Image (cartoon, rainbow, N blue to C red):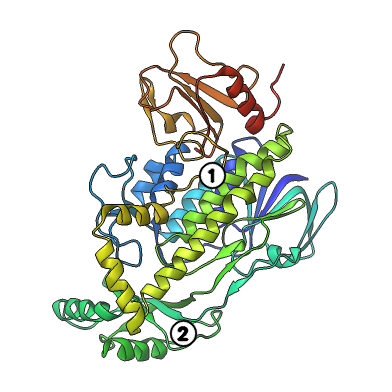
């Protein structure tokens, strides 16, 4: 008997398993694939908010070793202008390009090191839930039991379909071919041609991927079954149609395709079964938000589900997962819809693109769109209060170090700048750490921070603090 079974060991499933293990929850992760993908099919853009979450869990240094920093400019439909130094209250004002297998492996190793069990080659085919738990059935007939079950099993989620949860939205209208191969044209000629094509077709990309190979992205003709990979001849044909040349491509290492279907699950929870990551939402890769959205789902859900299992969760706490994350996903779907329109080649979209490019010269427009893509503009609705309430807390510096260094264990944090006796979180010491430092670089007398880094309370009044401790962290231990 497990506390939680997770279907899918991608970044969302692995991160969720690790978050649960921080609270000593018994976790089993079931992954259909027997081995990780052998090729780097995508370079993921890890954005500011996800980098901050990695810092909160002590993973940032290991992630930085696997990635390459890029400037923030161009992340909204390849239009946003470079962000000046000091624009954002974070030391992570860049995009980190990381090979997808490297991120997957890092998060899986992190979960296993914390005590999660991962079983590969295990396909979930069904499940049943009752008032006491969930029975999960595998393809080989084995049946496993857990208190809760979470579907992190991707766009074609068996878990979502088994729940009967609606997945409304739009089917794919555009398809893009993606592959890695050698190119047989002089580099100067190639760069000039790529620049020329991208003037009218921003979805086209040809860039070095190492070892003499190039990663090529080219719009496809029509929409086909994504389960069927394109042929090499398909690829060459589309290159000639879009660029007027196939660049002498040869020696393809792998070929793939992706579409721009846009869908959002109607519900993230039915009883003891929940959805996270691509199981709950799918959208075009514009802006590189997909993996970031899934990892952030996992960090939002992990401590809340652990609190329910550990027995101290206030009754509505688990429901705040959908209340907070569903609108965030809806916003991502909308901005990716907009970005796909802006990369269309028709005269109308191109006119709008030129207009928006002019508007990017206004700092507030540029900054707002960067905040949207990087998820640092999110503000959860915690009621009326100061602007910081509901927002993520930056990595505040104080005498003993930085705030994120104190959040590796996934607990709440009271950061108090009071002189003298200060504020108290007595009764919640098993769930909330306290840092008292009048010199902390914080523009507030005190803040209560949830394990996911969002500010749950701002103020100086003990009774108000006590009320919010109860709201987010349950009854005190007496």
| Residue 53 drawn above or below residue 441 | below
Reading the chain from its start, which is encountered first: label 2 or label 1? Answer: 2
The answer to whether residue 351 is left or right of residue 405 is left
Residue 62 at x, y percent in the picture? 39, 44
Label count reads: 2
Q: Residue at x 27, y 80 (%)?
A: 200
Residue 446 appears in view: yes
Q: For the residues carrying marks 2 and 1, which lies nearer the camera in this image?
A: 1
The answer to whether residue 472 is left or right of residue 228 is right
Seen from the viewer's position, the closer of residues 437 and 444 is 444
Label 2 crowding class (10 Å Cα cut-off): few <14, some 14-19, many 20+? some
Seen from the viewer's position, the closer of residues 16 and 473 is 473
Q: Which of the 4 image quarters holds residue 144?
A: bottom right
Residue 82 at x, y percent in the picture? 24, 56
- Gap between marks 2 and 1, in whole Å? 42 Å
Label 1 crowding class (10 Å Cα cut-off): few <14, some 14-19, many 20+? some
Q: Which residue is mark 2?
A: 230
Residue 380's disc is 1
Residue 339's disc is none
Residue 139 appears in view: no
Q: Residue at x 35, y 84 (%)?
A: 346
Q: Residue furthest front?
A: 384
Q: Residue at x 31, y 79 (%)?
A: 201
């Amino acid at each position: 008997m497990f506390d939680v079974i997770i279907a899918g060991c991608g970044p969302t499933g692995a991160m969720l398993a690790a978050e649960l293990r921080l609270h000593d929850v018994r976790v089993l992760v079931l992954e259909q694939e027997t081995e990780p993908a052998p090729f780097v099919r995508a370079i993921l853009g890890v954005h500011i908010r996800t980098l901050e979450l990695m810092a909160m869990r002590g993973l940032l240094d290991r992630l930085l070793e696997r990635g390459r920093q890029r400037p923030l400019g161009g992340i909204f439909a390849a239009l946003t202008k470079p962000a000046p130094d000091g624009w954002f209250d974070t030391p992570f004002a860049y995009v980190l390009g990381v090979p997808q297998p490297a991120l997957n492996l890092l998060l899986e190793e992190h979960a296993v090191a914390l005590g999660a069990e991962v079983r590969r080659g295990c396909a979930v085919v069904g499940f049943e839930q009752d008032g006491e738990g969930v029975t999960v059935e595998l393809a080989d007939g084995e049946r496993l039991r857990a208190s809760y079950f979470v579907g992190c099993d991707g766009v074609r989620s068996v878990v979502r379909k088994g729940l009967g949860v609606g997945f409304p939205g739009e089917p794919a209208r555009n398809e893009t071919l993606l592959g890695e191969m050698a190119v047989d044209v002089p580099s100067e000629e190639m760069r000039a041609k790529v620049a020329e094509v991208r003037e009218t077709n921003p979805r086209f990309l040809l860039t070095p991927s190492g070892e003499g190979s190039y990663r090529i992205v080219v719009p496809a003709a029509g929409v086909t079954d994504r389960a069927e990979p394109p042929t090499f001849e398909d690829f060459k044909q589309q290159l000639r149609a879009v660029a007027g040349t196939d660049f002498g491509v040869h020696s393809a290492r792998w070929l793939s395709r992706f579409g721009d279907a846009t869908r959002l699950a109607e519900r993230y929870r039915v009883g003891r079964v929940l959805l996270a990551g691509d199981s709950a939402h799918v959208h075009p890769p514009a802006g590189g938000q997909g993996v970031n959205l899934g990892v952030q789902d996992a960090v939002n859900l992990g401590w809340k589900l652990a609190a329910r299992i550990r027995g101290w969760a206030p009754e509505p706490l688990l429901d705040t997962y959908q209340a907070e994350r569903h609108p965030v996903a809806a916003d991502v779907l909308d901005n990716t819809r907009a970005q796909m329109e802006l990369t269309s080649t028709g005269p109308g979209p191109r006119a709008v693109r030129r207009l928006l490019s002019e508007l990017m010269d206004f700092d507030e427009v540029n900054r707002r769109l960067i905040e949207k893509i990087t998820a640092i503009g999110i503000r959860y609705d915690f009621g009326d209060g100061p602007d910081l309430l509901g927002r993520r807390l930056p990595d505040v510096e104080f005498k003993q170090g930085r705030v994120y260094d104190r959040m590796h264990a996934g607990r709440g944090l009271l950061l108090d700048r009071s002189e003298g006796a200060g504020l108290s979180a007595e009764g919640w010491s098993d769930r909330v750490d306290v840092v008292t430092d009048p010199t902390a670089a914080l523009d507030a007398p005190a803040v209560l921070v949830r394990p996911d880094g969002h500010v749950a309370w701002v103020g100086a009044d003990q009774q108000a603090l006590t009320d919010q401790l109860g709201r987010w962290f349950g009854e005190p231990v007496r």
